[in-house]
Image (cartoon, rainbow, N blue to C red):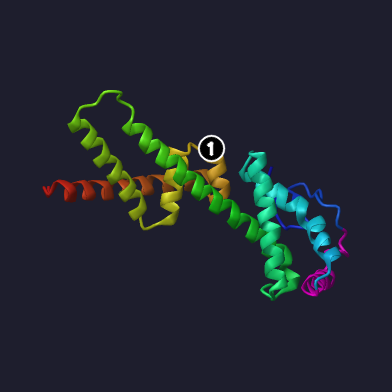
Amino acid sequence: MVCSVLLGRIHTAGGMELTSSSREATSPEATSELVRKIQAGDPAAESELISRYGRGVTILIRRASSDTSAVDDLFQQTFQIALEKIRGGDVREPERLSGFICSLARNLVIDQFRKAAARRFTRFVEGAQAADPSPGPLEDLLKVERASIVRSVLSELPSERDREILFRFYIAEDEKDSICRDLVLTSLHFNRVLFRARERYRELYEETTRRKVGKPR
């Protein structure tokens, strides 16, 4: 489903509204008043914020994760941080509250993905090291060295997008469509980005291994 995500007024490509909030309730004036009430410590306004934008936040998070527990945690984090920011006066343009909450939820989703990808990659490397039940001392040493090089090369890639696309496609084994959606790439652009990221990784890997063995080619 192709969505234009504007929290508080989320529409599918066909134009169906996915929130019960009225246009009056989501007008710039009403949104500014809601922010003012939250800053004044009005508990009802805080509940109204969650009621108004909760459905949109849930839809956005569920597009990235099917883990119910993770969705709940990210939902709670989104509104906890949003309320803290509003109370602290960090929302300087109340009429853009929808965009603020959308960006906040998306950033939390991306951050969780990166942490999860790092954990999966660590398990992947550790699993590769333990694949042989009875390796000799030399093989043990070589496996540890290769794992160290792999971690080093991935961390040294200068492009954050390169690191993310390699992690997600080869380690996390995410679907191509999901990666394209999250990184805002067409299928053709994805292929080009992946190819370039793979080439940059290969070049850096070869350079790193040459440094390790001390034999320039």
Q: Is residue 22 left or right of residue 163?
A: right
Query: Does the magenta segment cover residue 156?
Result: no
Query: Label 1's element?
Result: loop
Q: Which residue is denoted by mark 1 in the rendering? A: 175
Q: Nearer the viewer, residue 42 or 109?
A: 42
Q: Is residue 40 left or right of residue 177?
A: right
Q: Which x, y percent locates residue 58?
A: 72, 48
Residue 191 visible in rendering: no
* Disc 1 residue crowd, few under 14, some 14–19, many 20+, Cα 10 Å: few
Q: Is residue 14 left or right of residue 65?
A: right
Quarter of the image with the N terminus is top right
Q: Which x, y percent locates residue 146?
A: 26, 40
Q: Which x, y percent locates residue 209?
A: 21, 46
Residue 42 visible in rendering: yes
Q: Nearer the viewer, residue 137 or 106?
A: 137
Q: Which x, y percent locates residue 190?
A: 48, 46
**Which residue: 45% across, 53% down?**
161
**Which residue: 41% across, 50% down?**
163
Amino acid residing under circle 1: Glu
What stretch of residues is rendered in magenta? 22-40
Query: Does the magenta segment cover residue 37?
Result: yes
